[in-house]
Amino acid sequence: MKKILYFIVIALFFNACSSNNNYNSISNYIDIKKENKNFRNDSCTFNSYTSSNKSSLYGNIFIEHITLSSSCKWNGFQRSFFDNLFKQKTAVKTFVAIERIDFDNIEFSTYLVNDKYIMNLIYDFNSFENTFIVDYKGVLFNKMIKKFDKNYINHYSNKARFQSNYNSSLVNENIIENYYSEEIEILD
């Protein structure tokens, strides 16, 4: 009995040490209430949503969170899919990444839009979850990136900012664009 109890304690210890505690999660900055979430579902996703939030501190923030089921896979690079859909739905002429910084499973991008406006994108990803955060004002971007690099200086914070009412979804567009699909296992 003591061996079993000892084994359970050791297993719980290692499980607690290896848990994924995302200290830089969007929920640590913005309270996304259930009523602000527009849930998006198809045969490959669950608990996926878009949300448009406005706060006095962060300004307008758009979030798309996608959770793929384990039987599905992306058919390309997720952030590129998001970039292309954003560009298409906002009818911007030019959309160029001028800065991209990676830390673990989070990517911070700064874009030059229409050759004169700045916009920030925070892309948080892991095996089956992807979160895209469009930060029009750039305050959330600065706050989150400084958790990884205290010395980061945003050279674009005082530039004119891009604004839009983007509210599209990769999940909604998947049926047409085939961003992800179910993996079909071939049996011998």
Image (cartoon, rainbow, N blue to C red):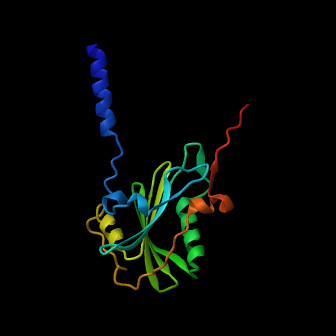
Where is the C terminus found, in terms of image quarters?
A: top right
Q: What is the quadrant of residue 12 in the picture?
A: top left
Furthest residue to the top? 1
Q: Is residue 102 visible?
A: yes
The residue lying at 26 percent from left, 68 percent from top is 151
Total marks in image: 0
Left or right: residue 128 compared with residue 101: right
Residue closer to the observer: 4 or 37:
37
Left or right: residue 159 compared with residue 89: left
Q: What is the quadrant of residue 134 in the picture?
A: bottom left
Q: What is the quadrant of residue 28 in the picture?
A: bottom left
User: Where in the figure is residue 2, as x and y percent of width and height?
Assistant: 26, 15
Residue closer to the observer: 30 or 154:
30
Residue closer to the observer: 7 or 27:
27
The residue lying at 68 percent from left, 42 percent from top is 184
Q: Is residue 65 visible?
A: no
The residue lying at 48 percent from left, 56 percent from top is 130
Where is the N terminus found, in terms of image quarters?
A: top left
User: Where in the figure is residue 137, as x and y percent of width and height?
Assistant: 37, 77
Furthest residue to the right? 188
User: Where in the figure is residue 157, as x and y percent of width and height?
Assistant: 34, 79
User: Where in the figure is residue 99, as x and y percent of width and height?
Assistant: 43, 72
Furthest residue to the front? 35
